[in-house]
C-alpha cells in the first residue's frame, strides 16, 4: 500500500494565516473558500487537516492565545522581581503594540469574537472556550494585583482593580480597531497605571 502523501503546508503557518482571515472578517464573515485560499489548499484538504469551520476557529483561538496574547500577560509574572508599575506599563504597551501592529489586523481577535457571540448562531462550544480563556486571563491579573499591588481592602478590591484593568485593555483593543492613534492609547495606558498604583 502506498504511503499517504505528506501535507505540503506548515500547520502553525496555516493556523496563523487562518487567524488573520478570522481576525479581519470575523467568524460569520469568513467562508471556507476564503480560508482555503489563504492557506493555499483546497477545501477537502482543509477539512482533513483542521475539521470544519468551527473546529478550525477553535484551533485558531488557541493559537492566538498562546502565540500572541500569553506573552503580553507573562509580563505580569508575580515571580519577577520588578517594579509593578513598570510591569503594568510593559503589559499594556505590549497589548497596544499587538492591537496596532501593521502586520496583523488591528484590535483583538477575542474582542471581535465576543461581540459576535451575541448572535444566537454563534457556536456554543466556541463561546465556552472564550469564557474559559477569559477566566484564565482574569486569574492572571487578579493574582498579580493581589501579590504585587497588595490592596488593603481584600478580595473585593482585587476584583474591582482586575476588572478595571480588563475594561481598559478591552477598550484599548476597540479603539485601536477604530483607528485611534498609538499615542492616544499609550496616554490611556499611563493614566490607567497611575490610577491602579494609587488604589
Image: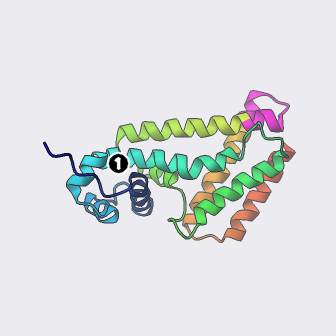
Q: Position of residue 175 (x, y in %)?
A: 60, 63
Residue 126 located left or right of residue 111: left
Residue 198 located left or right of residue 40: right
At 60% from the left and 60% from the top, the residue drawn is 98
Q: Position of residue 29 (x, y in %)?
A: 34, 60
Is 163 covered by the magenta stretch? no
Q: Position of residue 58 (x, y in %)?
A: 39, 44
- Assess disc 1: are there few (<14), some (14-19) or many (≥20) residues with their C-alpha within 10 Å of its C-alpha: some
Who is closer to the viewer here, 83 or 4? 4
In the picture, the quarter occupied by the N terminus is top left
Outermost residue, top side? 154
Q: Inspect this view and state whether residue 2 appears.
A: yes
At 81% from the left and 52% from the top, the residue drawn is 86
Reply above or below: 109 against 121: below
Q: Secondary structure at mark 1?
A: helix
At 45% from the left and 51% from the top, the residue drawn is 113
Outermost residue, left side? 1
Reply above or below: 139 against 28: above
Span colored in magenta: 144-159
Is 158 covered by the magenta stretch? yes
Who is closer to the viewer here, 56 or 150? 56
Amino acid at each position: 500500500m502506498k504511503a499517504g502523501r505528506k501535507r505540503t503546508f506548515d500547520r502553525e503557518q496555516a493556523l496563523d494565516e487562518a487567524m488573520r482571515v478570522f481576525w479581519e472578517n470575523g467568524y460569520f464573515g469568513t467562508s471556507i473558500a476564503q480560508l482555503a485560499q489563504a492557506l493555499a489548499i483546497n477545501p477537502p484538504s482543509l477539512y482533513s487537516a483542521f475539521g470544519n469551520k468551527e473546529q478550525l476557529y477553535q484551533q485558531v483561538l488557541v493559537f492566538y492565545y498562546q502565540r500572541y496574547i500569553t506573552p503580553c500577560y507573562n509580563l505580569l509574572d508575580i515571580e519577577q522581581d520588578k517594579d509593578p508599575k513598570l510591569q503594568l506599563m510593559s503589559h499594556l504597551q505590549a497589548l497596544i503594540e499587538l492591537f496596532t501592529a501593521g502586520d496583523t489586523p488591528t484590535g483583538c481577535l477575542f474582542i471581535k469574537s465576543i461581540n459576535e457571540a451575541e448572535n444566537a448562531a454563534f457556536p456554543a462550544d466556541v463561546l465556552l472556550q472564550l469564557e474559559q480563556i477569559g477566566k484564565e486571563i482574569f486569574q492572571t491579573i487578579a493574582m498579580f494585583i493581589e501579590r504585587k499591588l497588595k490592596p488593603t481592602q481584600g478580595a473585593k478590591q482585587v476584583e474591582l482593580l482586575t476588572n478595571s484593568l480588563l475594561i481598559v485593555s478591552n477598550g484599548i483593543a476597540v479603539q485601536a480597531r477604530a483607528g485611534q492613534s498609538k499615542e492616544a492609547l499609550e496616554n490611556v495606558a499611563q493614566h490607567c497605571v497611575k490610577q491602579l498604583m494609587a488604589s
